[in-house]
Structures are given as structure tokens and as C-alpha cells.
Amino acid sequence: MIRAAVLACLPVAALADPTFEDLSANLPQLVYDGGWEHFVGGGIAVFDCNGDALPDAFAAGGENPAKLIINEGGFAFRDGAIAPLFGVTGAYPIDIDADGHTDLFVLRVGENAVLRGGPDCTFQEQTDPVLAGGDRWSTAFTAWWETGDSRPTFAVGNYVDRSDPDGPFEACDNNAVLRPLGEGYVSDALTPGFCPLSILAAKDARDRPTLRLSNDRHYYVSGGREQMWDIADKRFLGEEDGWPDVALWGMGIASRDLNGDGLDDVMLTSMGDQLLQFSQTDGTYAAADYSIGTYSQRPHIGDDGRPSTGWHAEFGDVDNDGRADLFIAKGNVDQMPGMAMRDPNNLLMQSPDGTFHEAAATAGVATTDRSRGGALVDFDLDGRLDLIVSNRRAPLELYRNTTSQTGNWMTVSLQQSGGNRDAIGAEITVETDDMRQSIQQVIGGGHAGGQLLPRHFGLGTAEAATIQVDWPDGTVTITDAIAGDRIMITKP
């Protein structure tokens, strides 16, 4: 009943169906490729590396060198100058040293790497030996700032232990929590590990900072589960906490408040059903009804009736109607005969009643390569979210959002003093007369990639909105009656 009441307050007018223009030819050539260690991964990090407000990207290449892609405006892109880096599964943007230049934490098969950002999209590798992590297979990442720390804490998810002679099945490696100490870092094992492909540090349904780990049962086989780890208590949650055992072929995590109650709901991609969990007022989660339209368990075009395989998932308001839509990258692991081979990506548009309908085919983004990573990003700063997708053994894809009659919009950029310059852990709430939306400022989730950019909100027909920011230190700021169709920079 609470969910229905909140949804009734959202805008009811439907806007135009989404359309996209394929501009993949404008990107530098890159293919994510490699053997079984690159069946997973293929993530994309999106951020602004030169201060021109245009989003740039760093894309994993697997056995091919990773690529820095510079946005020159007008959907023109060029190769960035970066030292060759092989074995990359994914990367996440983060300002580790609070110097105003975004850095990259790069996940690899082998030692991970930290690329320190400098002026004009320059990067230098400066990897603390503890952050490198040794010869492991890293596939998941998240970061947060502990109270009083000037540098971030990281969690790295490690997939199969390749040194285990009895592997690969039931040979999941240990994960690691990497904490700042003195001038360096120390590593604490986060066990048991069940082969994570995504980790997200965010406030959970209890409104407490928690690590959510989405694990691939293809390798843990039995005895494993999805995991929630309380950051303050440093313990895994169990049934006594209202966290029941959930086992799936976990690939990616997307998190956003879908019903205006101030708590994030969570999308978990998998082979077969894609699981959407709604936060409940008692601090637990409930699986969405099948009728909501998000399970997307089989291809929506073609005649392949075998189950789909979901990877990167991301919420974003594609038509700016004030309701978050959902993109899911789909693709067979490689040649798994029990799963669909030509598996189209999903673009699930949210309707006024909170259900979702498939629009990828009519929008022109239902490609059937083995997609892995992706991002919904406004590359040309016109207020409409565009789309970039990485594929295994196929080139990157780029789509410009050409949807007509979209609603108004607003993006919010957070800045504060101290080590946590981008206010990771804050919550942004945008409110108009007929809707309330919130986004947590987090680093992590997705599948092997994420973005660090101003947060985008569709406003529907509203021409102005108030912005409330709950900052990491507990301070609350409210800005009244800000006109839409603009980028807002907010400071405490």
C-alpha cells in the first residue's frame, strides 16, 4: 500500500518512446577479448578527465590493451595517451587523493593497478603493493570513506582462485577489504568468498552502510549465496537480520530508489531471471512481482527460447519523465548451449504505474553481441542520457539519445572539502510538486565498471525543483526552487 501511494504522486503523462542513433563508428576501435579469464568483465569507467564537463571513458580490453577514450564534443572521440595495460577486466573512477583529478582503480587478471589522474587526461601508474593484490582474478570493486579517514577504503572481489589444483568449481578466492593505514594500506580478508562479479557499498534497507556482494553460483556451485556485510559491525548478515539465503548467477548490481520512499531498491542480474528487490520499511527486501516486467528471462526478439544472461545493469531516466528506466547488457558467457546465443540487450522503460515495458528494439539498441559493460551517460550535455556498451569479441557500441519531446532535467554535482572530495556516501533528493527522487552518491556496483559524474534527474513537466543533500558528515543542505535543464554544483 505504501508503494502504491507513493507511485500515485508521480507524473502520469507518458512522453515519447525512446529513440537512439547508432554512432559506434565515432569511437576508437576496441574489442574486449581473451580466453576463459575474460568470459567475465569488460567494464567501462566514465568520468571527466580534463575538466571540460564532457564525459570521457576508460574501457577494458581483456587480452587487448585497455583504452582511454577522450570526448571532444559533438560525438567526436579520440584515443587518449595511456601506457599499454593488459589483462584488464574493468575499472572504476575515484578521486583517491582529493586533488581534483579523477583516478582509476583498474581490475585485472593479475595485479590490479591504480592510475593517478593529472591535468589534460594524463595518468601515471602509482599502485600501492597492497592495492595491487597479487596474482589474482579481480572482478568486482567498491569504495567508501570511513569516518575520520582522508583516504578511501576499498573492497575488491576476487573470482576463481586460479592456483587451486582442484578448481575451478568450488574454488572461489577470498575477497579483500583494503584500509588506509599511515602512508599505505593494509588488507583484511573478506571471507567466505563466493566468486563475486559485483560489489556495492551503499545504505541498505535498514539505512545502514553495507556491502552487497553478488556472486556467481556457476563456480561456487553449492553452499554459497548472495551476501550482505555490515560495514560498521564488520559481519555478514543472516536470516536473523531479515536477510534470507538467495542464490543466483550474480553478475551485476544496480541500485536506485524507484518509489520515492528514500530507500534504494536493487536490481541483480543473472542467468535467467533478473531479480529486482524492493526495500521494505522493516529493513528487509521483497522480490518484485513477476508482473512488474523486469525479470527479462528470455530474449525479447528472435526465436531463441533459451534463458538470457544479464551482465551490467544501470538505472537512468532515458526520457526525463521523472521515472528511472533500466538498461541491462545481455550476452552468452561464450558458447553455453543452455543459454540464448543471440541475446538482445534490454531497455526497460518505467510506466506511471511502476511497471516496466521493453523498448530496446524500437529504440534501436537491441543488439545481440555478447554485451558485458555499459553506461547511460549524457555525452553531448543536451540533457538526454546516451548509451555506451562493451562487448566480448565485438567492438564497442555508442548510441546518441534522439528521443523527441523529453521532459525537463537537472544534474547535481557534489563537491566538499577534505579527502572525500566528491562526497561519496551522500544522498541527493530532488523534489518537485508531484514527485520525489533520491540517488545515493556511491562508487561500485554495475559489472566491472561505473561512473563518477554529476547525477542526472528527469523532472517531467516540472520547470524547477528543490535539491536536498544529506552529506556524509550528517549535514543537510536544501536549495529551493532551482530552474531545471541545468547542471548544479552543490557544496555543504
Image (cartoon, rainbow, N blue to C red):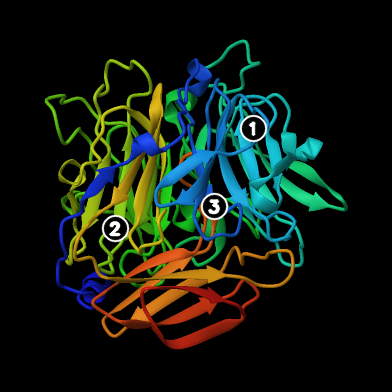
Q: Residue furthest right?
A: 182
Q: Which label sits on residue 47?
A: 3
Going 49% across and 49% down the picture, which residue do you hit? Answer: 72
Vertical arrangement, residue 133 with respect to residue 466, above or below: above
Q: Secondary structure at mark 3?
A: strand
Residue 212 visible in this rendered orientation of the protein = no
- Three-letter amino acid code at the position of disc 2: Val
Residue 10 located left or right of residue 88: left
Q: Position of residue 248 (x, y in %)?
A: 38, 36
Foreground of the two, 142 or 222: 142
**Mark 3 or mark 1: whose residue is earlier in sequence:** 3
**Mark 2 or mark 1: whose residue is earlier in sequence:** 1
Vertical arrangement, residue 271 with respect to residue 11, above or below: above
Q: To which residue does mark 1 refer?
A: 174
- Contact between marks 3 and 1 (CB within 8 A): the answer is no
Q: Residues within 10 Å of mark 3 (few under 14, many from 20)?
A: many
Residue 419 located left or right of residue 337: right
- Using the rendered view, name the quadrant where residue 76 is placed: top left
Q: To which residue does mark 2 refer?
A: 318
Mark 3 or mark 1, whichever is nearer to me: 3
Q: Position of residue 327 (x, y in %)?
A: 31, 47
Going 16% across and 24% down the picture, which residue do you hit? Answer: 304
Q: Position of residue 182 (x, y in %)?
A: 88, 53
Foreground of the two, 205 or 321: 321
- Three-letter amino acid code at the position of disc 1: Asn
Foreground of the two, 165 or 157: 157
